[in-house]
Image: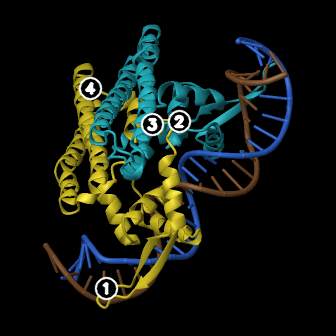
Chain colours: A yellow, B cyan, C brown, D blue
Amino acid sequence: MLKYAILGFLNYRSMFGYELKQSMDGSIQHFWHSKLSQIYMTLKSLESDKLLVSEIENQDDKPDRKRYSITELGKQDLREWLNKPLLTINPHKDELLLKLFFSASVDKSDLIQELSLLKKLHLQKLKTYQSSTKEIISNSTKHEPKIKEDAILWEATRRMGEMYESMYIQWIDETLIILQKKFKGRKS
Amino acid sequence: MLKYAILGFLNYRSMFGYELKQSMDGSIQHFWHSKLSQIYMTLKSLESDKLLVSEIENQDDKPDRKRYSITELGKQDLREWLNKPLLTINPHKDELLLKLFFSASVDKSDLIQELSLLKKLHLQKLKTYQSSTKEIISNSTKHEPKIKEDAILWEATRRMGEMYESMYIQWIDETLIILQKKFKGRKS
DNA sequence: ATTATCATGTAAAAGGTTACATGATTTG
DNA sequence: CAAATCATGTAACCTTTTACATGATAAT
């Protein structure tokens, strides 16, 4: 579905591959992410499918770049995808939970340390969603009121990021308490 | 990492490919899932890496089956993985959020319908984690007290499933209210 | 009769990561 | 002087999905 992430962004305005990566990392990174190499490959295939067109722009001080624009065919494809409702929950994978599930033999203080570090990382993410991500969305509405309907939906997805991180942190806290209680003073 | 899910289960006891799939779907499906075809392929490659061995069992009434057992090398590999702490958050993907992010032009009653259906599915999952999954875990402890340490960690992962689904449902409810408020009576 | 369950697999395609390659400018 | 940012891409590899193939028994 990287295809539709790309079409979605290019439907706002034309962009370069590199720029697309930055847009993704700055707005949808908590529910979609891709490596640059994959973005470039996908852009190529979307162009050969006539969903995009590109033109090369020369820059004096910086490397040349390729500006991609969505075509009518591309817009149509995007619209069809947007109008087709999802009928199933999309499963996801969490390596931490997989590891934890099988970790009965692992030293408990190691698990506690691991969870404590991950808690810090989740707290950082939470703060990002609560400050910079939130500001980006509210700023975009001020300058261009016509994108208000977009901003409402962007805010809904941001809110999910916030709720998810809060929930994850709460779960880590609960799990840390259980680990400290049940295995107190026990060696592995 | 399907590799480690397989090694993890086979470290409890030897199993058939088909059985492995059932075990996964019955216990870790909310943070790990795989198709049967992939399980068979991975079993094959793990066996050629000497992490597993297999023996064919004949059954009169049912098809033959292949029982896989973990080797010492496999146990070692699993232990190494379990002892290596995760240092990063694993990103995930959610097609619903991706679609919603770009859905400003979509008919709002369609979005409301889609979210309402998904809410029902999440409610079902939540109930499963709160009843059958919970029972499976507590039953396993009663009959085999030596797996108590395992059961504590299984319960922690089950709890994440429960918290995740509760959070998701709450987010859908909030989002439904926003959609109904902001776009009341408006045509797409 | 048809569908579900048991049971194993192969082949092709799609999706995604990692490593490599290039090369200028800017910031610390 | 080293690292980050800008900018694009290829090749090899790994992971995952989808479709196909077979065939018996049990349940509805």
Question: Which residue is denoted by mark 3 in the rendering?
Answer: B114
Foreground: disc 2 or disc 1? 1
Foreground: disc 4 or disc 1? 1
Q: Which of these two is toward me, D23 or A184? A: D23
Amino acid at the residue labelled 4: Leu
Whether residues under marks 4 and 1 lie with C-beta atoms below 8 angstroms apart, the answer is no
Q: Position of residue B47 (x, y in %)?
A: 64, 42
Amino acid at the residue labelled 2: Leu
Residue shown at the point (47%, 77%) measured from the top left: A54
Q: Which of these two is toward me, B17 or A167? A: A167
- Separation of disc 2 and disc 1 at Cα? 50 Å
Foreground: disc 2 or disc 3? 3
Judged from the image, the secondary structure of the residue bearing numbered disc 2 is helix
Amino acid at the residue labelled 3: Glu
Question: Which residue is denoted by mark 4 in the rendering?
Answer: A179
Disc 2 packing (10 Å; few <14; some 14–19; many ≥20): many
On residue A62, which mark appears?
Answer: 1
N-terminal of the two: label 2 or label 3?
2
- Separation of disc 2 and disc 3 at Cα? 38 Å
Q: Position of residue B77 (x, y in %)?
A: 49, 42
